Amino acid sequence: MRFHSIDLNTEDPIFEKVYGDPVEFDEKMRNGLWSKIVKCLQEKKPNSQIYSQINNLLSEFSQDSRFPFVSLKTHHIITQILRDLIETLNVKSKDELRIKKLYLLKIRFPESEFHRLKELREFINTRNSVVTTLHNLLNSKYPRIGDELLALFLTDEQIEEALTKLYELGAPCILEIFECKVEKRDYLGRLIYLVRDSNYIVRSINCSEDLGFKERVSTWAKMLEEREEVAWLCISLQKPIHECVKEFLEIVFEELKDKGKELEEWKEIPEEISPDLLIAFAEGYSEFLGDVKEHLGKFFHINLDEFTAVKSIDYFLVVLPVQDREKSLEAYCSILELKKKLRFKSLTVSMVIADRKYPFWRIREAFKNTFSWIVGESMYSLSDEDVEYLRRISGSMKEASKSQLHNIISKCGMIGKELKFFLESRAKQESCPLESQEI
C-alpha cells in the first residue's frame, strides 16, 4: 500500500492521524521542526535521552509521503527493534538476509480478571507487576501502550521462544498474534518488503485461574468509601485492532479521494494490514485515551492512575468517586466530544453509576454504549442522543421542581425522538421551564 510521492517543491507532506485532524507540514512548520531538532542536539551531547526527545518531535511527521499513516517516531522504534532481532540471526551480510515472516505479538492483562478481585488498589498493583514482568522478560525496548505490550519477531523460533517464556511464567494474559508473510518487491526502483498474507490468532494464559485474593466487601478502594455511589467508565473497541485499522484506512482513503489524491497501487483497502500500521494505530489511539484521562482528572480532581482498573487498547476501565450525577454526566459528555475526533467508528463509551458495593459482574453487563445509573434493582439508561438533548437543556432544567425532574428522568430510557417529543410537550404545557423548548 503506497501513495504517489509528494514533490516537496509543490506539495507539503501530510500525516494522517488516528485521533485528530491530518497534520500538513508546510515550509514554516518543517523549518520549525528542524530548528527544534538542531537545538536538542546542540544543548547536550547526543545520548539515548536526546534521541528519545527528537523521536517525540517526529511523532506527527510521516515516515514517507507515499505512506502517511506511520510517523518517523514509530518507524525509528520499529527499525531499531528489527535491527536487534536481525543481529540474533547471525547473517554475515545484508545479501544473506531472507525475511519471510514478521510477527506482531500483542499482550494484555485480561479485564475479565477484575470481577474476581475485591479491592481496586490490590488489582492495580498486581496488574502493574504482571505487565512490568512481561516487559522485562521479553524486551524492554518493545512499545508499551498503557498495559499492553507490542512485540515484534522475525522467525518462528523467536516467537516460540517468547511464548515458551510467557507460559512458563504463568501470569494471566491474553495474546493476540499477527503472523504476516512478507516478500520483497521492486517498487519505483528499490526493493521493499510487502505483506502478502496474514493470520490472526488469539490465545490466553491462566485467565480463569484463581489469583489467590481473599473475598472481601466490594469497596474497591479506600478513597471511595466516603461516597455512596461510584461511576464506572468503560471504553472498548468493538472489533479486533486490525479491523479498526481498516476502518481508519477507509475513512482516510475517502478523504484523500475527495482531495484529488491518487492511489498508486491500491484502488481499495488491502486485505492484509502490516505490523507498522497496527503499532501506529495503537499509538494514535493511545493519544485519545491520554486526553480521556486528563479530562476525567480535571472533572473529578483526582490522580486517575489510582482509579484506573484496566488501561489497554481494547478495554479501558475506570472507577470514579461520584460527587453528583450531573457532574458525572458532564464528564461523560466531554468524553463523547473527544470520541468525535477519532477516525474510526467501532468504539463504545459507557458510564454506569451505582452503589459502590454493587457487584461488578452486573456492572459489566450494563456497558452498552450508554450513560446509565442503577437504583435498587432498576437501571435507567440514556443513549448518546438522549444525553445530547439533556445537555442542551440542562441549564433550564435546574429551575424545574424535583417531581418534574423525576418524571423526566423516568422517561429517559426512551429513544431520542420519543424523549424529544416528551420534553417538548411538557414545555408547551409549562410543566417544565419554557427554555427547554430550545430542543
Image (cartoon, rainbow, N blue to C red):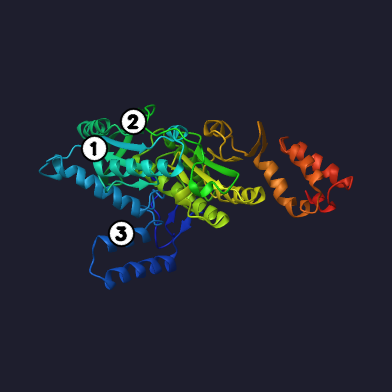
Distance from Cα at disc 1 to Cα at disc 3 = 25 Å
Q: Nearer the viewer, mark 1 or mark 3?
A: 3
Q: Which residue is labeled 1 in the image?
A: 154
State the image coordinates of residue 322 (x, y, percent, origin top left).
Answer: 60, 48
Q: Amino acid at mark 2?
A: Asp
Q: Label for residue 210?
A: none
Q: How packed is label 2: few (under 14 Cα within 10 Å), some, or many (20 or more)?
A: some
| Label 1, label 2: how far apart the Cα atoms are | 15 Å
First-in-chain label (1 vs 2): 1
Name the amino acid, label 1. Answer: Leu
Among the 4 quarters of the image, the one containing residue 198: top left
Which residue is tagged 2? 197
Q: Which one is earlier in the sequence, the residue at label 1 or at label 3?
A: 3
Q: Are marks 1 and 3 in contact (CB under 8 Å)?
A: no
Identify which amino acid the numbered label 3 is placed on: Ser
Element class at badge 1: loop
Q: Is residue 98 above or below residue 66?
A: above
Q: Residues within 10 Å of mark 3 (few under 14, many from 20)?
A: few
Left or right: 155, with 249 as reference point: left
The residue located at (33%, 62%) in the rendering is: 53
Quadrant in the picture for residue 231: top right
Element class at badge 2: strand
Determine whether the residue tagged by mark 3 lies in a helix, strand or loop.
helix
Spatial separation of the CA atoms under disc 2 and disc 3:
33 Å
Question: Residue 52 shows which numbered tag?
Answer: 3
Q: Nearer the viewer, residue 153 or 214?
A: 214
Residue under the image location 23 percent in, 69 percent down:
45
